[in-house]
Amino acid sequence: MELFLEFLKEALKGVTRAVSSHFFQKAFLNKKKTTPRRQKHKGGSRK
């Protein structure tokens, strides 16, 4: 029984670590601009 509880504790620790690293990467490391910037179009008559 004690061996099972140790295994369960280690499994929960691993899951918690994986989930927290996923949210950390999503929040801080994968920052992308929400709207991509367009290049300005040059219009008008050129002389």
Image (spheres, rainbow, N blue to C red):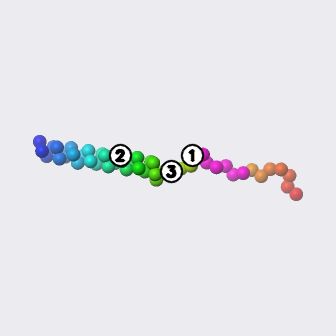
Magenta portion: prevailing SS class = loop
Q: Residues within 10 Å of mark 2 (few under 14, many from 20)?
A: few
Q: Is residue 11 magenta?
A: no
- 15 displayed left or right of 36: left
Residue range of the region highlighted in magenta in the rendering: 35-40
- 46 displayed left or right of 31: right
Q: Position of residue 46 (x, y in %)?
A: 85, 55
Q: Position of residue 5 (x, y in %)?
A: 16, 43
Q: Please report the residue visible at 61 percent of the width from the left and 48 percent of the height from the top.
A: 36
The numbered mark at residue 34 is 1
Q: Earlier in the sequence, mark 2 or mark 3?
A: 2
Q: Residues within 10 Å of mark 3 (few under 14, many from 20)?
A: few
Q: Please report the residue visible at 28 percent of the width from the left and 48 percent of the height from the top.
A: 14
Q: CA distance from mark 2 to mark 1?
A: 24 Å
Q: Secondary structure at mark 2?
A: helix
In the rendered image, which quarter is residue 4 located in? top left
Q: Earlier in the sequence, mark 2 or mark 1?
A: 2
Q: Secondary structure at mark 1?
A: loop
Three-letter residue code for mark 3: Lys
Three-letter residue code for mark 1: Thr
| Quadrant (top left, top right, bottom left, bottom right) of the C terminus | bottom right
Q: CA distance from mark 3 to mark 1?
A: 9 Å
As drawn, the residue found furthest toward the right would be: 47
Q: Position of residue 13 (x, y in %)?
A: 26, 48
Q: Which residue position holds label 2?
A: 19
The numbered mark at residue 3 is none
Q: Which residue position holds label 3?
A: 31
| Quadrant (top left, top right, bottom left, bottom right) of the N terminus | top left
